[in-house]
Image (cartoon, coloured by chain):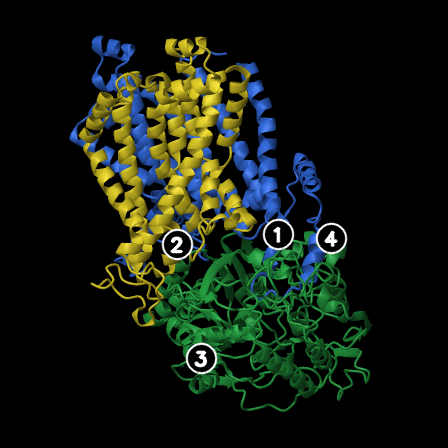
Chain colours: A yellow, B green, C blue
Amino acid sequence: MINTTQSASSRLTLDRVGPALAPDQGLRSKPQSMARVYIRRFLRHRLAAAGLAVLVLITLMAVLAPLITQDPNALSASDRKAAPSAGHWFGTDEAGRDILARTIHGGRISLAVGIAATGVALLIGTLVGAVAGYFGGLVDAVLMRVTDAFLCFPQLFVLIVFGTLMRTTELRVLQGNMTPIAIIIGLLSWMGLARIVRGTFLSLREQDYVEAARSVGAGNVRIMVRHILPGAVGPIVVQATLLIAVTIITESGLSYLGFGVQPPTSSWGNLLEGAKPFLQTLPVYAIAPGMMIFLTVMSINFVGDGLRDALDPHSRH
Amino acid sequence: MATKRLNRRRFVVTSAGAGLVAGSVMRPQFGVMAQEATPETGQTYYEDTQGPPQPGGTLRYLLYEDPNSLNPIMGATTIALQVVAAILEGLAESAPDGTFVPILAAELPTPENGGISEDLLTVTWKLKEGVVWSDGTPFTSEDVRFTWEAARDAANGSTLATDYALIIGVETPDDLTVVVTYSDFNAGYVDQFPWILPKHATGEIADMRNWAFNRAPIGTGPFKLDEWSSGEFLQLSANENYREENKPYLDELLFLVIPDESVRTAMMIEESAEIMLWSGQEADEQIEASGVGAPRTAPGVWVVEMRFNLSRPFDGDPGVDPPHPILGDIRTRRAITHGVNRDRINNELITGTVYELDSPLQVGWMDCQVEPFVFDPEAAMALLEEVGWRDEDGDGIREAHGVETVEDGTRLSLMMNGYTGFDTLDLIELAVQEDLMNIGMEIQIENQEFAVIFGTWEDGSPRMLGDYDILIYDAGLFAEPGADIARNYGPDQVPGPDNQGGENFHRWVREDVGEWIAAANSSPDLEVRRENFCKVADALREDIVSFPILQFSEGSAYSNKLHNFAVSTWEWSTWDVENWWLEQ
Amino acid sequence: MGAYIVRRILWAIPLLLFISIVVYGLLELSPGGPTSMYMRRGSGISAEDLARVEESLGLNDPFYVQYARWLGRVVQGDFGMATTSSRPVIDEIVDRLPNTLYLMGAAWGVSLLIAIPIGILSAVRQYSKFDHFVTALTFVGQSIPSFFLGLLLLLIFYMQLDNPFTGGPLLPSGGVKTIGENLTGFAMIKDRVLHLILPVTMLSATWVAWYSRFLRASMLETIHLDYVRTGRAKGLRERIVILRHAFRNAAIPLVTLMALDLPLLFAGALFAEVIFSWPGMGRLFYQAAERRDYGLLMAIIMITSLLIVIGNILADVAYRLLDPRIKLE
């Protein structure tokens, strides 16, 4: 939402090319061989492969942070604002904390928030989209109106208001202070997914095999989960991947403004915020978290692009 | 400790160039008495007296956000008051040394000049002759009376009503005389009228929130407001009707609103501005290194303390009993004070000027000296062992083994709440956490929104409800501290459903403390007041109710081209703006 | 068509009500409130006085009472007083909105001027070196967080590089114009343009990426459409085919996209305004949120929502009018 046009453009693209996004029927019939085809297609996309490699590296660093870095909160009065050196690759901040360690640890939070927010969006979006697409009619009309309503929220503004609320109420104690941020962002990011899932469900529910399942008395939930959902996995995966990039940028932006993750818990966004006074004297302090956001988001975009090509060759240009 | 104690008294600004002198803070003349200065309390502030002044020029002053209102009795923020102080004046103000000087008053009311009645309940102010507002209208006693009427009226937006609660009447026998009648002795009577509003240029009091004055004030001060472009700048020019000949020296005062700290710093270095309000540690270092300016400071009123909750938290009871399961034992609190290395925080981690102190009442004219806290991790650990906190599972954190108030196996872990958005506080918290980890105590830091920490009873603020272990934040006592001390430490001031305004968050109840506070607040004799407040300070130290870590200095970054100004602990930065002059 | 538009407008009313209730509810739920700014360091205001002010502002009334009172006033066009500035909310917005529109308009114009040729060229020369280069650049533009780019620009063009003639910074750090100097004529225009460069660059980087990528995709679609092929077969010059037929059709969804994106552009502008001291509405909102100015927050959110709704309606109408493939309901 901060990387502004993503949601709107995907909205529009999908409205127009919706049917083209319908999943490959082959997925269900020959899962093994199709998976291999997808992987081959994905890896042929060189940028996507490179993006995946970078992403794996960043994720590994984040996961293994406590093992591979110094203590990000260890203060060192004698080592304040040190230039990059062998001991501190990126130097140290105003309290002698290792900037590399802080950046990597910040990544744990930023990635976790991005993934968790996407998870929330995935849950809501899939549910709303599936119900709307499967039942159609009035249910569809109502749910799509709600989706439209959410699309009309000035998202960043509402997030800021939400942020002030979340950092002031009991919700804050759920876990550290990142869970609420993830939930907020997720709550405002599910609409694109809902539209895609709805489109897929609309087109698949009339298919013969769905009719067949219905005729043997399968319940609605069973049909939705067992028979239609697998067919929608491709577009959902693509969209969800790209959404992680958007939510990471959203979290960083919100934290940069001071309404997201609060220090001393560090995320890339609030590290960047904290680095502002040092922009001139210690540029690496700001550049490290900024570049990490940039690299992560670009890698995810590459991977998303590759996934789209692999899972959804019709939409390719 | 001894050297640090000297530090606190030392001249804190290394001044370069001629004409810079260190003023020394004498005891402010508060109350009726207090003529004698005590030389040993020589706290210092920055003062530049270079002359002769070169008149003219525009001073550019950097703010980080817009003022909210230029009406000082309607909750103007501290940012706003920096602007207001150039436009409006009061009857009297504090000089940097803490003494009071008359501004719009001809003299300060004292028993000697008949300004104060024998029963201490009637104060008579004589006003200066010939003072006019910037629009040419004469300033009279009616304006003072009007100010009181507006300021006491909380229903229409005044945020200072409490300060005027003791006044039962203001009379104006003639244009230059104001007689104020109190229902009870007000120890802060000299500071009663820090601002005077013009009756003719405001409006109906009932309509105060809509006064044009709030955005375009008329004052008696050295400058008048020409234009305020929201989010951009406030442009002030010299008030040609100002009462002092040839002053102000500056032609224009331009307040620029620049939200980004790095930009403000860079503007100072590029000489695109002359003052950066409350420049942080990093900005100070950069500006000083560039040679165009430097931080200029005075001792601040802000003291950072770790505040202990003596009562059990999260038991649904804001009251005093039962005691806190961990902090209820004074040995554990003492262990904390032995475990934290304040010297490292104050001298190594924080590079700006701060002062170490052992009592929140060791400030201003009270300057209560108490037994110093000592950093001694060995003693801290011994105390914890004695209580029954030992680390037997080897995870570095002690558990209870025979502690009476908690179950065996309970980890020695405490929550510490501060507020968000203040980097220096974050740093102090981390240092405390690290130090206490070394004696086997876990501190979980959780910073909350300002509005939560300092929220009201109805907001469910943790300190009001008593739902916290340790609070860490900075608070200050102003020149007249009586009311705040009573609220903070009075035995009847524990917040609860029946006393939602109480601020005894520690839940520290001692009847003798209540008596001392009452004795101090009902006497005009500064010695009596001081003696009683220092008894409170000793009791605070004895019971280890809080652990003071440092006292901030107050100040901003100033260009080397600005002269003839003083940084005051007690007043807003522009308090003496009429004297300022710029090298052309 | 008329009926459709009326229906959309009628639907917008409950939508805006819904948004206002949600946001008002959020504000109401959070502790503190418009008076919390008084609690900042050093204001020296007592808890009793705060409580009295809250009472007099009606902040202690139940949520629905406050909301109803707010709605009643707004319906009459009165957004109340901004507690952060002691003046009517609407004055505050009227002061700031033009600055935001000015910045967004400039950034938008620049973005289109760059994105359109790039998008067309890379579609026409699909898979050429140029196309690959542009694709790579658009990935960068899409992925770089705008606030990080803003800081980098500030670092390079204000803090590091100097103007070789004056020795001062190469570009101004922010603001709409140089304050305190009454420039006129060419000097004024130059001053304004210099102040625009950094924020516009920051905003355009992302927008150029999105618009050119989008335009490339829709150009590729139209290039292969029948009538474009027909035009080509009829022997029309390539340039005319591309511009007259293909681009005109590809531009329709782009226009729609931009209408839909209008509100998101406001969000982007918020960062530019905060970093470059731009006295616009985004920064006003940021400050209002910091200080809990409910009246101002609500007004800005409602005005932005209204703009979004209008943008949506216009986009739909334009789409339906212009695209022959969609039949009118």
Q: Which mark is residue C34?
A: 1
Quarter-of-image position of residue B404: bottom right
Foreground pick, C205 / B341: B341
| Residue depth check, mark 2 versus mark 1: number of the one nearer the observer | 2
Does residue C112 show up? Answer: no
Q: Nearer the viewer, mark 1 or mark 3?
A: 3
Which of labels 4 and 1 is toward the front?
Answer: 1
In the rendered structure, which amino acid carries the disc numbered 4?
A: Asp
Residue labelled with disc 2: A266
Q: Nearer the viewer, mark 2 or mark 4?
A: 2
Q: Amino acid at mark 3?
A: Ala
Q: Are marks 3 and 4 on the same chain?
A: yes
Q: Are marks 2 and 3 in contact (CB under 8 Å)?
A: no
Rounded to the nearest angstrom, the CA distance separating label 2 from label 4 is 47 Å
Q: Which residue is drawn at the image coordinates 51% and 64% (left, top)?
A: B253
Q: State the residue position of label 3.
A: B379
Whether residue B515 sits left or right of residue A197 in the image: it is: right
Q: Residue B207, labelled with which disc?
A: 4
Q: Residue at x 61, y 74 (%)?
A: B478
Label 1: which secondary element:
helix
**Mark 2 and mark 1: span between their CA atoms?**
29 Å
- Residue type at mark 2 is Ser
The residues tagged by marks 4 and 1 sit, at their Cα atoms, a distance apart of 19 Å
* Chain of residue at mark 1: C
Task: Please give the label number shown on residue C240.
Answer: none
Q: Residues within 10 Å of mark 2 (few under 14, many from 20)?
A: many
Disc 4 is attached to a residue of which chain?
B
